[in-house]
Amino acid sequence: MIELTEGQELTLTTADGKPLTNVQMAVGWDHAPTAGFIGSGAAPIDLDASAVQFAGTQFFDIAFFNHLGTRDGSVVHLGDNTTGKGQGDDEVITVDLGRVYPKVDSILFLVSSYQGHSLEYIRNAYCRLVDDDGTELARFTLTLGVRETGLVMAKLFRDGSSWKLRAIGTGIALKTPTDSIEALVPFVQPRHE
């Protein structure tokens, strides 16, 4: 397993160099002790994982709590966790890379607060990429509090015939990914080196 840092990339291949075909992006988080009913009297924070597909800079499709799968069936959200309680992954999105529509060249993975809470009240937020066998390939852990209501965690993108993962970790002012698709476009534009 590789612990990624912001901006780091990983090619999605098997140990023998073949492109991976199926992966899961799992996200998890813990609430800060001062959040929730016991601490402040506020309701627990409901975070949601989302996957947004783009063809170039054009929005293509989405999988999130209100729309669990993309039209091509390649990206499926496995269900909404409204409390973040419990051990391990809170929400999981599966990606069948072989079924992703050919025009789609990037998939953004987001976490956002449906109720509009700042993400500075969560701890230990991470996203991890897991293969078919349940082997964790990479993990990106958020180490600093995020003042915004959303976070662009990572991006899967095509690189020739294979896919790569890039850790992003940038806060964004969204409660759901459909609030402003335009705000996500800079994350899918080619990097200017």
Image: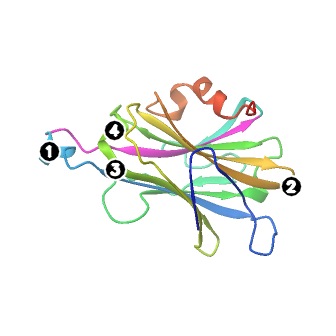
Q: Earlier in the sequence, mark 3 or mark 2?
A: 3
Q: Nearer the viewer, mark 4 or mark 1?
A: 4
Disc 3 or 1, which lies upstream in sequence?
1
The earlier-in-sequence mark between 2 and 1 is: 1
Q: Main secondary structure of the magenta part?
A: strand
Residue denoted by label 2: 161
Residue holding disc 3? 123
Q: Secondary structure at mark 1?
A: helix
Q: Is residue 153 above or below residue 133?
A: above
**Helix, strand, or loop for circle 2?**
loop
| Residue depicted at x 62% and y 23% | 182
Q: Amino acid at mark 2?
A: Ser
In this view, the residue in front, 189 or 79, is: 189
The residue at which mark 4 appears reads as 120
Mark 4 → mark 3, Cα distance in angstroms: 8 Å
Mark 4 or mark 1, which has the lower sequence index?
1
Instruction: Please identify the residue farthest to the right as the structure is shown.
Output: 160
Q: Which residue is mark 1?
A: 39
- Side (left or right) of 78 relative to 182: left
Q: Which mark is residue 4?
A: none
Amino acid identity at mark 1: Gly
